[in-house]
Image: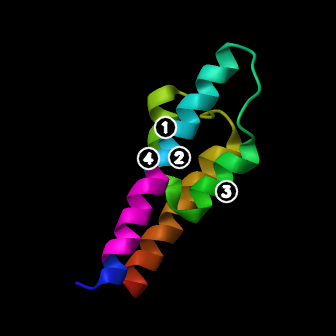
Amino acid sequence: MSNYFYALLIYIIAVNIYAFYLFGKDKKLSKTNKWRVSENRLLFVGFVGGSLGGILGMKHFSHKTKKRKFTILIPLFLALHLFLFYKFII
């Protein structure tokens, strides 16, 4: 496999860990009434590759699970990422 594949794999792992972390951080901040992570940032990180981490973060922290925007867009981003992976990598 090429270096491109490994670089992409490292990026995907890192952005998903970051997405999971952001959902947890936002949940913690929501309980303490502190400055929160913006919804746009959470969605952007999901869009640029962190959709699986976002879904896992939503489920694990029970966060943003009732917001229609998140329950539709984050899984849609995951479907897009899987399609692109299948189309261009495999």
Instruction: Look at the image and say whether residue 11 sits in the magenta stretch.
Output: yes
Label 4 sits on residue: 17
Distance Cα–Cα, label 1 vs label 4: 9 Å
The answer to whether mark 1 and mark 2 are in CB contact below 8 A is yes
* Residue ranking furthest to the top: 32
Q: Are marks 2 and 4 in contact (CB under 8 Å)?
A: yes
- Which is more N-terminal, label 3 or label 4? 4
Mark sitting on residue 19: 2
Disc 4 is placed on an element classified as: helix
Question: Residue at coordinates 60% horizontally, 25% vertically from top-left?
Answer: 27
Neighbours of disc 2 within 10 Å: few (<14), some (14-19), many (20+): many
In the rendered structure, which amino acid carries the disc numbered 4? Ile
N-term-proximal mark, 3 vs 2: 2
Q: Secondary structure at mark 3?
A: helix
Residue 16 shows in this picture? yes
Question: As drawn, which residue projects farthest toward the left?
Answer: 1
In depth, the one of 56 and 79 nearer the eye is 56
83 displayed left or right of 32 = left
Q: Amino acid at mark 2?
A: Ala
Going 41% across and 86% down the picture, which residue do you hit?
A: 88
Residue 6, relative to residue 43: is it above or below? below
Q: Which residue corresponds to mark 1?
A: 57
The residue at the point 73 percent across, 30 percent down is: 36
Marks 3/1: CA distance? 15 Å
Where the C terminus falls, by quadrant? bottom left
- Residue range highlighted in magenta: 6-16
